[in-house]
Amino acid sequence: GKARMSSTKVQAKEAKKSSKNVALAEKAVMNDPNSAAYRVLLGEAYLDAGRFQSAATSFGDAMRLGETSPHTALRLALAHVGAGQQNQALAVLDEWRDQIEPSDLGLAYSLAGQPSRGVYVLSAALREGDNTPKTRQNLAYAYALAGDWANARLMAAQDVPADKVGDRLLEW
């Protein structure tokens, strides 16, 4: 049979890749410090490497340099969540709530410590016709974060095979 790479080797390979991406993005920013696009790339590289505070700084810098996309605002909020800065994350989400896609916004609110608000946003999106697997699964996860396991199971079951729902809930 085929030899499979051990999970440790896979993790090492990923770590090497993400540190290479960070180094490349840092070099691009050094070469052009006023490029909002390079700051976004650096933020993404930091996020992938699990360097959440650095990611938040880079996304914030990008936005100050004129990068005003809802995607970047969402990534900034998620970087704040990863860094344990729920209040900053919530401030960004509140400021951008009308531009960020509801399926992303609801999950981000949930991850930032307001799962009931996330459930509300995601439920409203579903009622308004955003009935996609992404929205349903984000709602299922928001229910789980809120401790509402019955609704999490019901929602997850809409897109996950019945024999896999339990595994999905355990993952959460």
Image: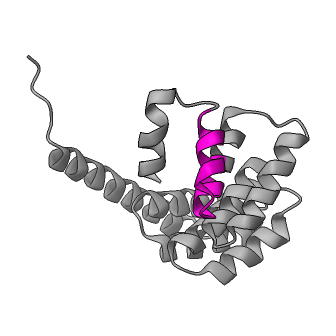
- Towards the viewer: 134 or 124: 124
Q: Is residue 111 left or right of residue 167?
A: right
Q: Which image quadrant is residue 160 in?
A: top right
Q: Is residue 142 magenta?
A: yes
Q: Is residue 3 left or right of residue 41?
A: left
Q: Residue at x 58, y 81 (%)?
A: 85
Above or below residue 69? Residue 53 is: below
* Residue 110, percent from left and from top: 66, 64
Q: Main secondary structure of the magenta part?
A: helix
- Towards the viewer: 47 or 166: 166
Q: Residue at x 65, y 56 (%)?
A: 143
**Whether residue 110 can be seen here:** yes
* Residue 3, percent from left and from top: 9, 26
Quarter of the N terminus within the rendering: top left
**Whether residue 35 can be seen here:** no
Q: Residue at x 24, y 50 (%)?
A: 11
Q: Is residue 20 left or right of residue 162?
A: left
* Residue 172, percent from left and from top: 47, 54
Magenta segment boundaries in residue numbering: 140-157
